[in-house]
Image: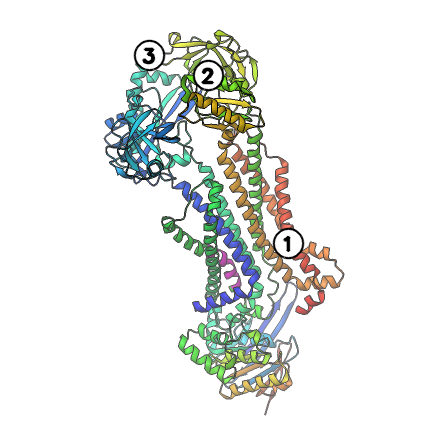
Amino acid sequence: MIKITDLEKFYRTEEVETIALNKLSIEVKKGEFVAIMGPSGCGKSTLLNILGMLDDPDSGSYVFNGVEVAHFTERKRADLRKHNIGFVFQSFNLIDELTVFENVELPLIYTGVPSAERVKRVEEVLDKMQIMHRRNHYPQQLSGGQQQRVAISRAVVNKPKLILADEPTGNLDSSNGNEVMELLTDLNEQGTTIIMVTHSEHDARYSHRIIRLLDGQTVVENIMI
Amino acid sequence: MIRNYIKTAYRSLLKNKGFTILNVLGLSLGLASCLLIILYVVDELSYDRYNTNADRIYRVNEDLKLGENNVLYAVCMPPLAQALKNDFPYVENAVRIKNAGSMHVKKGATNILETKIALADPSLFNVFTLPMINGSPATALAEPNCVVITESISKKYFNRTNVVGETLKLNDSWYKIAGVIRDIPAQSHFNFDFFISMSSYPDSRSTEWLRSDYNTYVLFKDAIDHKKLETALPAFLNKYSGEQMQSELKMSMAAFEKGGSFFRLNLTPLTDIHLKSNRTGELGPNGTVQYVYMFSAIALFILLIACVNFMNLSTARSANRAREVGVRKVLGSSKKYLIAQFLTESILVTLVATIIAFITAIALLPAFNQLSGKEIAINSQTLTWLIPVLLAIVLIVGAMAGSYPAFYLSAFQPIDVLKGKLSAGFKGSGLRGFLVIMQFSISIFLIIGTLVIYNQLNYIQTKNLGYNRNQVLIVQNTFELNNQAKVFKQEIKQLPGVINATLTGFLPTSNWKNTSIFFKDAAFDQKKALFPQTWEVDEDYIKTLDMKMASGRSFSSQMLTDSSGIIINESAAKFLGLKDPLNKPLYRSKGGKQDISNSKEYHVIGVVKDFNFSSLRDVISPVVLVLAHNTGALSIRVNTKNLPALLSQMKEKWKALSPNVQMNFSFMDQDFDASYRTEQRVGKIFIVFTSLAIIIACLGLFGLAAYAAEQRTKEIGIRKILGASVAVIAGLLSFDFIKLVFIAMLISLPAGWFLMNKWLQDFAYRVNIQWWVLALAGFTAILIALITISFQSIKAALSNPVNSLRSE
């Protein structure tokens, strides 16, 4: 599903050039659950942003579903993104002015799903995530675990092929964190590919494979049994 | 989608109540001011447009140059209107109107002095749109001794409007009411309550082509015809006036013009009269197009300041909205959607602000009317243009104010935002600094404008005018006493508390004007003719009005030869080039052939120091005073603490002489003030709107300062931990803004000085713009800005550094 080859990304300030990704090559198959680990500054988040088409690489190739997307325009990337990729962030990134229902509904609005269909799909997802009773609440009125469940609902409501999760349990206590990991595992079992950046060995154990990065390069890959 | 925009916008506005209130308040204040000014400007521009034929009506004017004297008249010769109709087939109609001044209108026991009376030709109703509700427009003014009155006058005297056939006594003659018309709209350059048929006035049949005293209007068949008439006018005038000039002055028009003089006719479109015409003999006080421009500019300035506020506050707030933008982008929103979202938000705010502004404007309209001396009303007719204008304002201002935040916010890279790279939204924007500079430049300019206008008005109030207008009471209608006027004067002079009194209508504050032609030698050289104000006064004039003699003496009842004596003012002496004018002869032309047999010889007995008698906008022109019996008014210099008692004594004396007519009086200082009412109003309007502009600018600055402090919370915390004092931090935060105000000063002080000097050029007598005016304007701006900012700066500086660091 994803194949990146010799991917490079630099960050430049006036005097210093930092290499974030150094000729990195990775392949992720459809239905896989991959965890990316490594110390701070190893390039995890940069990789995730490029995979999520939020950022573009300086060189190298990125083939998504058989299409080379490394140098797509912003508009094309946005279009591909909204139909195929769901995001889960450490800090949830819910919009404070919208209710739970409206937050989850947002991706459907941007993909032009008609109103009646939207209501049906949002309710379905909220039900599945057991957060239906909170549909009219605002994010500030929810606990961290509940907020992350809303964020996951929002990530999956458009039935994406790929979910990118950036330290999804980073802001949660362990019981809420476990719940979130269970949810992700369920989604993966239903066929969604998941790539997750994490610092937590515990969370990484939920995945099929761990890619460890150091200084923008793959140092080791562990296959989980 | 749009529902989602509105919903988000609504909730976001509600969440940031402080910001929303500042924004809506600033914008609605700006829009309300703008609306009031728009109403004022539209009112000024709508003069005479109530006439359905407005575009085809022109007034004929006369420009006269005689020697060095140049006079522009709004009036023309008595036979002109008829001759135009006879000679030019494209002139559909023509009408003469003559101001008849004030008259006592009597009906039974009622006796009221009415001031809005005119004489008019029967064609009045063919040319102007003055709907008649009772009577026949075709015949109403055809017969002598007929009068057409307005609806309110009809109700005032008869309590009804079907009064055709009734009679009213105007002064001493009876007039039959031949028609009742609707009241003339306030937006008319003439506003009369009575139109007397022109044929009642024998002079109207005069065939003289060498004098001008009838306001004459022509209605063309086609608007374009005025060009044809303009080309034909010189030949036309030569045909009629030239003939009389030849027979009376023994001089052809060509010879007259050869001497450097001229005598020309021209046309003014009806709709230009109110704002662009200021000639001798206007039918009423006109407006000034300059003020229309000035107010339009102020309205635009205020709107600009309010929009800039909106833009500044929205972008300053952008850091708080950045995360939302990032999330929306990650979820697939394109730039287009985001721009639409932010525009929706700003249009929504503008809509709310406009509704508040509209309500505020309606509520403030009575106060504004009082301030501006207008009678503006919002009726269904106003709404037909006002609603589209308001909608346009909502869209334009909304789009203008929202476009910068919309494009600025939507251009955020989602990745940067979500990574928190975009928290420091404040210091980055140079545009925001530019906008603050613009706001303050405008505000400082308006402060300078206000100060200069006030200085000039104050100068007018306190300038030594060459006479003393205080403690002078004027009995306005002594002409009613006829031969008894002199007796009245003598009796008044006997009263205790009366210092002196002078009997004449020619006063520096009155509208009585009379000019005649003088020559300084028997050669009657036209090029050296003097064309002065020629005022008939009595021997008490100079003393009563407290004028000063530069040389010679005033008139004296003891000197029998004073009937041929003349007093000239300094300007006249200068004009005549006389170093020692005393006892020099002056020949006053009696009309007709200009030679010694047709003139009266005077000799100069005194030179009076120049005194102002028209607007201070004009240079003092030559005046000559001659001794004559003129009963126009009695000016009385009084010195009493008990004015009411003196007044009642005067009224008793009056009643003994004229039991049926009331004595009308006024005070000279008040008459003087009345002639500067426009300037005073303009000054007041200016100060009100300047204050508003500054308040709005401060609202914006207040909001910006709050955001700046918020953005720099962490910096403030660290500085405090490292030992910075509150004063240092408050200074640090304030300096960023004060710097901008300083730059604004550099721009607006020279610009303000230049533009206000230009305005002052209109006054022949004016103040200089002193350095302290500029200094005061700059200082005021800095002070206001400092007060506004320091509130936020000090608040931020006082906060606990531990809290501010924790929040990061």
Q: Which residue is mark 3?
A: B250
Q: Which residue is mark 2?
A: B487
Mark 1 nearby-residue class (10 Å; few <14, some 14–19, many ≥20):
many
Residue B400: in magenta span: yes
Which residues, given as a range, are shown in magenta? Answer: B397-409
Looking at the rendered image, the quarter that the C terminus of chain B falls into is: bottom right
Q: Amino acid at mark 2?
A: Val
Q: Left or right of B335: which side holds B199?
A: left
Cα separation, mark 2 vs mark 1, equals 72 Å
Disc nearest the viewer among 2 and 1? 2
Q: Residues within 10 Å of mark 2 (few under 14, many from 20)?
A: few
* Residue that badge 1 annotates: B789
Q: Is residue A129 or residue B719 the one in the foreground?
A: A129
Q: Is residue A17 left or right of residue B593?
A: right
User: How many circles with numbers are drawn on the protein?
Assistant: 3
Nearest the viewer among A92 and B392 is: B392
Is B794 above or below relative to A119? above
